[in-house]
Image: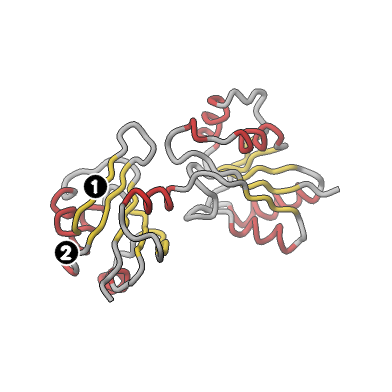
């Protein structure tokens, strides 16, 4: 009998956010496909999962080849757990090719509910949640930034801490009075949610910024 692929969201910061169901899936897995074997090893240690299932690296650089390898193992009866470094796999993380390949071969795919920084940032921002979209990483080109700012939906996007000051300055040059929020290190010890206009945020974050950043931009007026 074929096995299955179980997509297991991992904590976005606080390791205590792992659900009992996700822990049970990790315990039961024959192998765990993960972005960083060291980071996943730390999570398994925290959850006292010993002996740990075999860990296999699965990242953007080897996604295509690993998808072939892993679906073959599932067809032979393996239970494979898929995890990212943080949050839900396939949300700006590799795994689409593996999930698609499993579906095309009628292999079982189970996606467990769990943490994702996208809805956490959206709700924490205090901006409208009735209509919103996820942009992935904020685009670099001025024309693409203007497209984002024309959105009549709230926009959630990722940004590098090294670029957030530059990006906020570019956005503020186009729409300085647009409401926005910079969400930093969500669920971690130094969590911060800064809510203001893009103009104010550009001044506040023009220096060095550390940690994981999610930017939420309010909708354009209709």
- Mark 2 touches mark 1? (CB < 8 Å): no
Q: Residue at x 36, y 41 (%)?
A: 186
What residue is shown with label 1?
Answer: 194
Task: Describe the element under mark 1 as helix, strand or loop.
Answer: strand
In this rendering, position of residue 182 left or right of residue 205 = right
Rendered image quadrant of residue 144: bottom left
Task: Describe the element under mark 2 as helix, strand or loop.
Answer: loop
CA gap, disc 2 to disc 1? 15 Å
Q: Which residue is drawn at 69% across and 43% down?
A: 80
Residue located farthest toward the right when viewing the structure as drawn: 1
- Badge 2 or badge 1: first in the primary sequence: 2
Whether residue 123 is situated above or below residue 175 in the rendered picture: above
Quarter of the figure with the C terminus: bottom left
Horizontal and vertical percent position of residue 123: 37, 51
Q: Which residue is drawn at 54% across and 44% down?
A: 114
Rendered image quadrant of residue 54: top right
Residue 128, numbered circle: none
Closer to us: 124 or 92: 124
Horizontal and vertical percent position of residue 187: 39, 37
Whether residue 44 is situated above or below residue 8 in the rendered picture: above
What residue is shown with label 2?
Answer: 177
Closer to us: 201 or 45: 201
Rendered image quadrant of residue 20: top right
């Amino acid at each position: 009998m074929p096995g299955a692929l179980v997509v297991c969201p991992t904590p976005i910061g606080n390791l205590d956010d792992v659900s009992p169901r996700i822990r049970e899936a990790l315990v039961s897995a024959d192998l765990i496909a993960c972005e960083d074997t060291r980071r996943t090893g730390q999570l398994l240690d925290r959850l006292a999962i010993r002996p740990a299932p075999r860990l296999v690296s699965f990242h953007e650089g080897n996604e295509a080849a690993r998808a072939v390898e892993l679906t073959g193992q599932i067809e032979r009866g393996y239970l494979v757990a898929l995890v990212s470094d943080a949050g839900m796999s396939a949300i700006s993380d590799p795994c689409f090719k593996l999930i698609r390949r499993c579906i095309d071969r009628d292999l079982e795919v189970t996606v467990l509910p769990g943490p994702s920084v996208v809805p956490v940032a959206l709700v924490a921002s205090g901006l409208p949640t009735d209509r919103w979209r996820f942009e992935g990483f904020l685009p670099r080109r001025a024309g693409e930034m203007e497209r984002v700012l024309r959105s009549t939906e709230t926009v959630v996007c990722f940004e590098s801490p090294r670029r957030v000051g530059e990006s906020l300055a570019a956005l503020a040059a186009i729409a300085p009075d647009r409401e926005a929020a910079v969400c930093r290190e969500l669920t971690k010890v130094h969590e911060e949610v800064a809510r203001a206009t893009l103009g104010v945020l550009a001044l506040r974050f023009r220096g060095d910024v550390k940690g994981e950043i999610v930017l939420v931009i309010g909708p354009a007026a209709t």
